[in-house]
Image (spheres, rainbow, N blue to C red):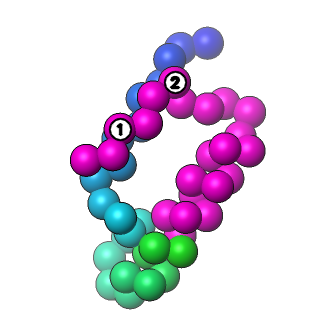
Amino acid sequence: MASKVLFITSEVMGRGDDRLGQMLMANFLRLLDESQEKPQTIIFL
């Protein structure tokens, strides 16, 4: 399996409602932890 690197460049996901974007990002990261294929590295910029 190839190594994967995830770059996260924002506190929110998407544009518009920041509250919704924060909830989406939090859920994405939570689900990523439960995923079968996890990235080797996550970089927050």
Relative to residue 14, is residue 32 depicted above or below? above
Q: At 45% across and 28% down in the image, what residue appears?
A: 41
Q: Which residue is mark 1?
A: 43
CA–CA distance in space, label 1 to label 2 = 10 Å
Q: At 53% across and 70% down in the image, what residue appears?
A: 24
Q: Residues within 10 Å of mark 1 (few under 14, many from 20)?
A: few
Q: At 46% across and 73% down in the image, what residue appears?
A: 22
Q: Image quadrant of residue 7?
A: top left
- Residue 35 lies in magenta, yes or no? yes
Question: Percent position (x, y) of residue 45?
Answer: 25, 47
Relative to residue 22, is residue 34 depicted above or below? above
Amino acid beneath label 2: Gln
Q: At 64% across and 55% down in the image, what residue appears?
A: 30
Question: Percent position (x, y) of residue 36?
Answer: 74, 33
Question: Percent position (x, y) of residue 11?
Answer: 35, 64
Relative to residue 3, is residue 28 depicted above or below? below
Q: Which residue is mark 2?
A: 40
Residue most extreme to the top:
1
Amino acid beneath label 1: Ile
Q: Image quadrant of residue 28?
A: bottom right
Magenta segment, which residues? 24-45
